[in-house]
Image: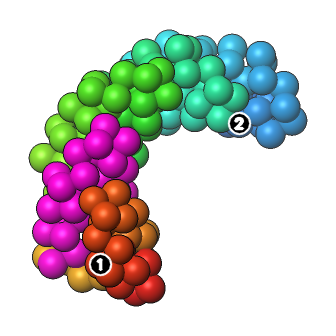
């Protein structure tokens, strides 16, 4: 029983540190929040929540160079969570490495083919990298398989306008 308590103590401490970090962040005490999130990361090397909280804080504050390794840690700790992959890809894009962003999203798309956020983010990166037809094909296939999605329809409208097909663009914008 004592051994079990000793094993669980760091996990409880990590949860407490995470909650304290969230409170510090809510109070706009960002430096303290960063310290607490980092302590929570160290206390439990498997829990993705402290990494996600720290990555989101850095991203929200526009500190993308600091966010990148933390998003990579989120993906390492929770490879089965799509939002971590999207956060990582968006950070690559903020750092003007759009090719790496597309590569990350293509990996995420293989892992999460049903996830509309992964599909949309990849479609926008294909738009950004001027791969309009690939983006159109990607979104059209997703919509055909899963049904209409307002955000993806808007993305299609933008992609079609990029290839000067204004009739299809208008159809998708109006859906």
For residue 89, what is the image quadrant? Answer: top left
**Can see residue 35?**
yes
Count all numbered tags in the image, as a single digit. Answer: 2
Residue at which label 2 appears: 22
Task: Tell me the SS state at disc 1.
Answer: helix
User: Does the magenta run of residues contain 3?
Assistant: no
Does residue 57 appear left or right of residue 126 in this picture? Answer: right
Residue under label 1:
168
Query: What quarter of the picture does the C terminus occupy?
Result: bottom left
- Name the side, left or right, on which 29 lies relative to 111: right
Q: Residue at x 24, y 82 (%)?
A: 147
Task: Indicate which label's residue lies in the foreground, 1 or 2.
Answer: 1
Label 1 or label 2, whichever comes before in sequence order: 2
Q: Please, is residue 111 above or below residue 35 in the view?
A: below
| Label 1: few (<14), some (14–19) or many (≥20) C-alpha neighbours in 10 Å | some
- Residue at left 31%, top 38%? 129
The quarter of the picture where residue 68 lies is: top left
Q: Magenta span covers which residues?
A: 117-144
């Amino acid at each position: 029983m004592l051994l079990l308590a000793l094993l669980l103590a760091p996990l409880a401490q990590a949860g407490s540190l995470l909650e304290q970090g969230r409170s510090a962040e809510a109070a706009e005490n960002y430096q303290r929040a960063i310290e607490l999130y980092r302590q929570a990361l160290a206390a439990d090397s498997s829990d993705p929540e402290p990494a996600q909280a720290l990555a989101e804080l850095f991203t929200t504050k526009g500190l993308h160079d600091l966010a990148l390794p933390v998003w990579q840690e989120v993906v390492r700790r929770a490879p089965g969570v799509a939002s971590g992959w999207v956060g990582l890809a968006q950070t690559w894009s903020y750092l003007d490495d759009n090719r790496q962003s597309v590569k990350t999203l293509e990996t995420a798309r293989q892992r999460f083919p049903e996830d509309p956020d992964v599909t949309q983010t990849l479609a926008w990166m294909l738009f950004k990298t001027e791969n309009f037809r690939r983006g159109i094909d990607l979104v059209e296939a997703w919509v055909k398989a899963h049904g209409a999605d307002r955000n993806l329809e808007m993305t299609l409208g933008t992609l079609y306008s990029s290839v000067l097909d204004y009739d299809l663009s208008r159809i998708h914008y109006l859906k």
